Image (spheres, rainbow, N blue to C red):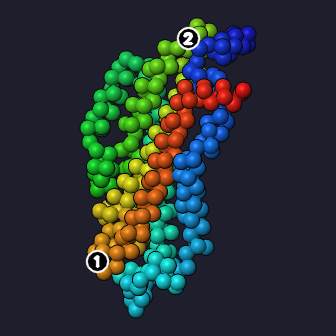
Amino acid sequence: MLDSSKKLDAIASKAEAPEIAREQPSTLWCWMLLNDLGARVGLAFILFIVSAAALASIIAGYDPTDQSVVNALLPPSTEHWFGTDEYGRDVFSRTVYGARPALIVGLLSVAFSLAVGVPLGMLAGFKGGWLDTVVTAIVDTMLSFPSLLMALFIVTLIGTSLPVVICAIGLANVPVFVRLARSSTLLVRELDYVAASRTFGASDFRIIVQHVLPNIISPLIVMATLSISGAITSEASLSFLGLGIQPPTPSWGNLIRDGVHAILEAPWLALIPGLCLTVSVLAFNIVGDALRDILDPRDLASSAAGKGQ
């Protein structure tokens, strides 16, 4: 049994696996990412937003829920950098604290989508048969509804708490990861090293974990990065509609909604959180686009060849 296992590993390592998994060091794409100007800019913005959210209690000069009617609708100044809203609350503090639910929902909802969609897609693609038929039918049905509409339906049906918002947005994005994992698995399962693994008696679980997953991880990373920006936008949309993060807890969505009512009198109330939302979404999209280009096997191969010379 031990000799068979060694032979299996030897054949799998020598088989014609995709270049991204066979020839490239695991740190190559990180090196390429840091050498991409757009990616560096996007990562800098993401790091800034994450740091601001993590240090909100230190950065913010005021409690985001404290009201002071006498200071209502003050314009930006040295005392209140982003001015105050109609209840006298400091907009800068509320904007900084509003980054927390955006990032929490963005990251955790995508993690939920990955945890549910990727195993389901790999099983459907690897096993085929009735399982593939059922999963494909369910996914196609879910994709017939816009993701925001599906999340809106779930939140309306269950409630508007933070965990529900995370699960609703995550569940709405599950079909995307199922289809991506399934289509990638359909390609990988036909490769020679997978056939060699079957010949030596490897279990389906071992083949999926050791050979399929490592070779479909690149497109999943790209999709996850791009999906974070979509999840942040969905959370802001739900909050704007009053079905996401509920006041007085600040989120960019409900800050924009509150600011729209006084857009002519105090435009900073909507413009500032709207700008923060735009920059965050743009930063994740830039990094996602850079990863999509970098993780292309042809680009990785050429970069590895150039680095080795």
- Between disc 2 and disc 1, the foreground one is 1
Q: Is residue 164 left or right of residue 33?
A: left
In the figure, 207 relative to 224: above or below? above
- The answer to whether 48 appears left or right of 165 in the picture is right
Q: Residues within 10 Å of mark 2 (few under 14, many from 20)?
A: some
Q: Nearer the viewer, residue 171 or 302?
A: 302
Circle 2 residue:
192
Q: Secondary structure at mark 2?
A: helix
Location of residue 234 with respect to 143 vertically, above or below: below
Distance of label 2 from label 1 (alpha carbons): 65 Å
Q: Which residue lies at the image location 34% right of the left edge and 79% below the top edge?
A: 266
Q: Residues within 10 Å of mark 1 (few under 14, many from 20)?
A: few
The percent coordinates of residue 59 (x first, y second) are 58, 73
Image position of 46 (left or right of 83): right
In the rendered view, would you say 265 is above or below 192? below
Q: Residue furthest bottom?
A: 70
Please report the residue visible at 55 percent of the width from the left and 79 percent of the height from the top. Answer: 61
What amino acid type is highlighted by mark number 2?
Asp
What quarter of the picture does the N terminus occupy?
A: top right
Residue 264: which disc? Answer: 1
Q: Secondary structure at mark 1?
A: loop
- Three-letter amino acid code at the position of disc 1: Leu
Using the image, tell me which numbered label, if any, was put on residue 93: none
